[in-house]
């Protein structure tokens, strides 16, 4: 199969990523609504942007040229221990809120939002 692919002008390589294009009109509408919302905030209110992340603590292998007959090994950990972090940035006060949980689920999200509300 490899010989056929080579004869037919195929090569072994990774594809390249092309960024998605956002709808400029929708972005402009969102920005206008956001600034209107921000101007009408009460003194005891704030705006936070947040998300949950699951970074993996392990080596991510890619391709490389390795001399034939040799095997290149790279040490790694089990790769099964992920961090589960909820985070939010308070753009009014400039504060960073974060919380690590065993799992990101509804209970963890409610706990995190309660933590932000009390801050």
Image (cartoon, rainbow, N blue to C red):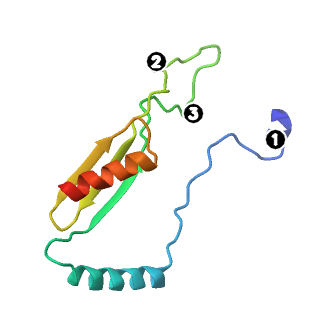
Query: In this image, 63 relative to 27: left or right?
Result: right
The local secondary structure at tag 1 comes to: helix
Query: Mark 3 vs mark 2: which is more N-terminal?
Result: 3
Q: CA distance from mark 2 to mark 1?
A: 33 Å
Residue drawn at x 54%, y 18% as measured from the top left:
72
Query: Mark 2 vs mark 1: which is more N-terminal?
Result: 1
* Total marks placed: 3
**Within 10 Å of the Cα at label 3, are there few (<14), some (14-19), or many (20+) other Cα atoms?**
few
Residue drawn at x 44%, y 33% as measured from the top left:
82
The local secondary structure at tag 2 comes to: loop
Marks 3,2: beta carbons within 8 A: no
Closer to us: 66 or 86: 86
Marks 3,1: beta carbons within 8 A: no
Q: CA distance from mark 3 to mark 2?
A: 16 Å
Point out residue 111 in the picture as x, y percentages from the top left corner.
33, 48
Q: Which residue is mark 3?
A: 63
**Within 10 Å of the Cα at label 1, are there few (<14), some (14-19), or many (20+) other Cα atoms?**
few
**Within 10 Å of the Cα at label 2, are there few (<14), some (14-19), or many (20+) other Cα atoms?**
few
Query: Mark 3 vs mark 1: which is more N-terminal?
Result: 1
Q: Quadrant of residue 64?
A: top right
Q: Is residue 49 above or below residue 43?
A: above
Query: In this image, 66 relative to 24: left or right?
Result: right
Q: Which mark is residue 75?
A: 2
């Amino acid at each position: 199969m490899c010989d056929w692919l080579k004869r037919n002008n195929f090569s072994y390589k990774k594809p390249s990523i092309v960024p998605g294009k956002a709808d400029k009109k929708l972005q402009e509408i969102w920005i206008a609504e956001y600034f209107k919302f921000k101007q009408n905030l009460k003194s005891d209110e704030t705006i936070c942007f947040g998300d949950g992340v699951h970074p993996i603590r392990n080596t991510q292998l890619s391709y490389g040229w390795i001399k034939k007959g040799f095997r290149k090994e790279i040490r790694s950990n089990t790769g099964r221990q992920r961090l589960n972090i909820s985070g939010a940035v308070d753009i009014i006060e400039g504060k960073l809120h974060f919380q690590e949980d065993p799992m990101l689920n509804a209970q963890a999200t409610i706990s995190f939002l309660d933590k932000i509300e009390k801050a």
